[in-house]
Image (tube, rainbow, N blue to C red):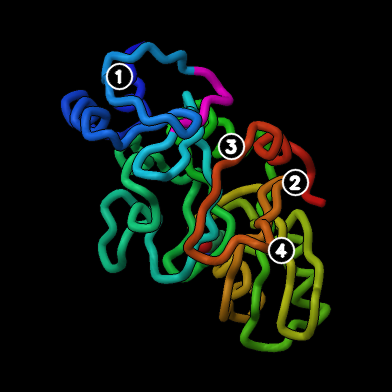
Amino acid sequence: MHLERLLQQQGFGARKMCRGLVRQGRFALAGVAIDDPFFEITPEEGLVFTVDGVDWPYAEKAVILLNKPAGYECSQSPRHHPGIDALLPSPLVTRGLQSIGRLDEDTTGLLLLTDNGNLIHALSSPKRKVEKRYRVTARHPLDAAQLAALRAGVTLRDAPQPAKAAAVEQVDAHTLLLGLTEGRYHQVKRMLAAVGNRVEALRRVAIGGLRLPDDLPEGQWRWLAASDLELVWRKTA
Ligand code: URA
């Protein structure tokens, strides 16, 4: 494949723009600058190239993990706050990465983004029962009756089926780890409200067996290797 085409596919802009980028000497392979846009390159997993001094792994489909900060909307047309695209480098935005599910503007933590439609579909399917785990800070002290109700299922307004937590683990008086296998609108906040409490802070800490890395600061992202993605299908540890 011609180098300019590979760069276009990886989100570096229109063909003409990629041609210019290469001619300007901004592209390198294994530390060696290449300024011929028609250089033949084999697109394969494991290929790492450099643009403007930044390394990019070749990815036929990109999957990344973002530690979402508060104050960003998971929407392509954000209304009141910046969208999460503002946290990503432009090639990933150009590729049209979308979040797999959504977190509220004030929710933080683990968010996966991809341009792989099949993956979005599979991970969003309630049939797969992938557990999303949240660390919930509650305004009022949590009591045994509230925890029992969350486990048994609570009734949400406008929803005939009760919402039931797949896992409930109390951390301290005001903190709870809550696992859900479905993703209804504002589900955690509505479930806490249904038991007479209120969410003060919400962070997603795991999807299946994939945990939010401790060393990834809020607002930062990293590539997700295929082996990490596999963890998603495992039960939360
Ligand atoms: N439940 C909520 O209420 N908000 C989120 O962002 C995610 C789950």
Cα distance, mark 1 to mark 2?
36 Å
Main secondary structure of the magenta stretch: loop
Asked if labels 1 and 3 touch by Cβ distance under 8 angstroms, the answer is no
Q: Residue furthest front?
A: 32
Q: Earlier in the sequence, mark 3 or mark 1?
A: 1
Q: Give the residue at mark 1.
A: 5
Pointer 2 residue:
209
* Camera sees residue 187: no
If you read the primary sequence from the N terminus, does the residue marked by circle 3 or circle 2 appear first?
3
- Mark 1: few/some/many CA within 10 Å (<14, 14-19, 20+): many
- Residues marked 4 and 3 touching at CB (< 8 Å): no
On the image, numbered disc 3 is attached to which residue?
123
- How many residues crowd mark 3 within 10 Å: few (<14), some (14–19), many (20+)? some
Q: Which residues are magenta?
A: 44-49
Which of the two labelled residues, at mark 1 and mark 4, occupies the earlier sequence position? 1
Q: Whole-Å distance between the Cαs marked 1 and 4?
A: 45 Å
The amino acid at mark 3 is Leu
Mark 1 in CB contact with mark 2 (< 8 angstroms): no
How far from the left and from the top, in percent, is residue 100? Answer: 50, 43
* Residue at 27% across, 20% down: 36
